[in-house]
């Protein structure tokens, strides 16, 4: 695997799971035909500065000629023979809608310098090299760093005692079916809110909303990002994913309805209580989605203007009873 | 009820016990973690068969003090580590969820549990 880290950062993991091979591959593929002489293929490689040429006709892939094939052709005196006889025809290929993470694993597992990319109709639509991956990751990481720099003013303010209770912004990538890490965002946000002396019952309301949205991203989406912004006594949570979308939002928000698989249900999730739970703890709730597109859920929980009280007027009017062991409910 | 008393009452073996003298205020029985999120009362023991990492996450978020895993199900190492880090006790019993709940219910005089502390007042 070209990534040296055993456990790359969450941002990087999210990137390589979100990006598809089609987003990264070179589309203008330089090809040869089966009857093209190896010498002509060599000239093509020299002129274009490439080390491998797919052999394809009308989009159908037959093989690939790479630098070792050319060297062998010179050594064997067969450089003017058609490439069909000497190309590599047992090929490892990628499909364009595979996650980039899958392609990165391929480069780690095999020694090939490039992989042809096919579409669902098995037609050649691109070629992927490690250079393509490096370029795309640098571009995306630069974008991510710019975004973090944009928010750095907020972070600096958060370090100031006066502003400590006013600002908090955290973002968490959530990877599809990554149950090992799902729930970490909710716990981190819970601890950050407790540090700000926000009332425990309000912290739990935020934590319930974040956890359910986190699990929804993990179970139902292709992965996404969850953010929590605390400012002016409000905790605003936004869960955003890139698909597959919800066709009937009203149905999805109904108690007991779920599209979760049996395996997910066996873990105790997918009971159709997620969105109803979120609505129950939220002071504001909205959801937008389109079939085949992304879904965005926005939740606001009022956590108190000074970050310390936060009880709703109804709660203040009706104090909670003591719990059975005699302690006051938090 | 102390966690020691809970263990004796349910014939349970402590697997993670940050504070043997710690107390629970009531119990909540469910294998649906969203149901636990929605309804588990503060300072309760969660009676369940869900023996994985996410159970600890949910218990922590809603303030459960202990997880009683039924049917003698194995407790994975990552679940134990998470519980130790979050100061949530884990006990394991051969009893079913029903049997364990009955015994805990008797100890609390079959009182109805409080509304969860994080419920919105309406």
Image (cartoon, helix red, strand yellow):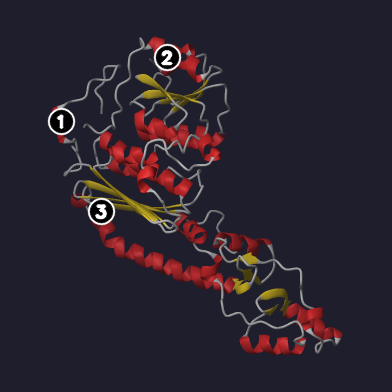
**Quarter-of-image position of residue A50:** bottom right
Task: Specify whether A99 is left or right of A156.
Answer: right
Q: Is residue A145 visible?
A: yes
Specify the subunit that label 2 lies on.
B
Q: CA separation, marks 1 and 2?
A: 32 Å
Taking the spot 64% from the left edge, 90% from the top edge, the residue there is A47
* Residue on which disc 3 sits: A158
* Residue on which disc 2 sits: B104
Q: Secondary structure at mark 3?
A: helix
Taking the spot 35% from the left edge, 32% from the top edge, the residue there is B38
Near mark 3 (Cα within 10 A), the count class, few <14, some 14-19 or many ≥20, is some
Q: CA separation, marks 1 and 3?
A: 29 Å
Discs 3, 2 touching: Cβ within 8 Å: no
* Whole-percent x, y for residue A251 in the image: 38, 43
* Residue on which disc 1 sits: A316
* Whole-percent x, y for residue B98 in the image: 48, 17
- Against A209, is A168 above or below? below
Residue toward you, B54 or A6: B54
Q: Secondary structure at mark 2?
A: helix
Q: Earlier in the sequence, mark 1 or mark 3?
A: 3
Same chain assignment for discs 1 and 2: no
Specify the subunit that label 3 lies on.
A
* Whole-percent x, y for residue B29 in the image: 43, 23
Nearer to us: label 3 or label 2: 2
* Whole-percent x, y for residue B1 in the image: 38, 15
- Against A1, is A226 above or below? above
């Amino acid at each position: 695997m070209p990534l040296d880290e055993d456990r790359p950062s969450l941002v990087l993991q999210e990137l390589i799971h979100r990006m598809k091979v089609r987003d990264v591959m070179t589309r203008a593929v330089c090809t040869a035909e089966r009857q093209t002489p190896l010498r002509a293929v060599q000239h093509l490689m020299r002129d274009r500065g490439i080390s491998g040429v797919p052999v394809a006709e009308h989009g159908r892939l037959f093989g690939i000629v790479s630098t070792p094939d050319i060297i062998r052709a010179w050594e064997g005196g067969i450089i003017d023979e058609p490439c069909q006889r000497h190309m590599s025809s047992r090929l490892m290929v990628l499909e364009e809608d595979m996650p980039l993470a899958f392609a990165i694993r391929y480069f780690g597992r095999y020694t090939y310098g490039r992989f042809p990319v096919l579409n669902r109709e098995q037609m050649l639509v691109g070629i992927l090299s490690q250079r393509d991956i490096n370029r795309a990751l640098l571009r995306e990481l630069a974008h991510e760093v710019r975004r973090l720099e944009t928010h750095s003013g907020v972070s600096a303010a958060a370090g100031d005692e006066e502003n400590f209770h006013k600002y908090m912004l955290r973002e968490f990538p959530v990877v599809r079916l990554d149950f090992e890490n799902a729930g970490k965002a909710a716990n981190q946000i819970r601890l950050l809110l407790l540090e700000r002396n926000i009332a425990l019952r309000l912290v739990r309301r935020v934590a319930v909303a974040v956890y359910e949205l986190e699990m929804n991203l993990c179970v139902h989406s292709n992965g996404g990002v969850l953010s929590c912004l605390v400012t002016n006594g409000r905790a605003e949570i936004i869960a955003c994913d890139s698909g597959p979308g919800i066709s009937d939002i009203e149905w999805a928000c109904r108690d007991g309805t779920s599209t979760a698989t049996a395996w997910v249900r066996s873990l105790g999730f997918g009971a159709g209580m997620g969105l109803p739970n979120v609505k129950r703890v939220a002071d504001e709730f909205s959801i937008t989605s389109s079939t085949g597109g992304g879904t965005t859920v926005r939740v606001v929980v009022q956590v108190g203007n000074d970050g310390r009280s936060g009880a709703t007027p109804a709660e203040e009017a009706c104090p909670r009873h003591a719990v059975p062991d005699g302690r006051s409910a938090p | 009820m102390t966690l020691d008393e809970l263990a004796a009452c349910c014939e349970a073996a402590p697997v993670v016990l940050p504070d043997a003298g710690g107390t629970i205020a009531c119990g909540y029985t469910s294998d649906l973690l969203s149901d636990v999120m929605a309804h588990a009362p503060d300072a309760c023991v969660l009676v369940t068969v869900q023996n994985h990492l996410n159970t600890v996450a949910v218990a922590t978020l809603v303030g459960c003090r202990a997880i009683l895993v039924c049917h003698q199900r194995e407790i994975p190492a990552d679940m134990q580590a998470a519980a130790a880090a979050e100061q949530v006790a884990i006990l394991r019993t051969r009893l079913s969820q029903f049997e364990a709940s009955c015994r805990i219910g008797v100890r609390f005089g079959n009182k109805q549990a409080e509304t969860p502390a994080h419920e919105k007042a309406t």
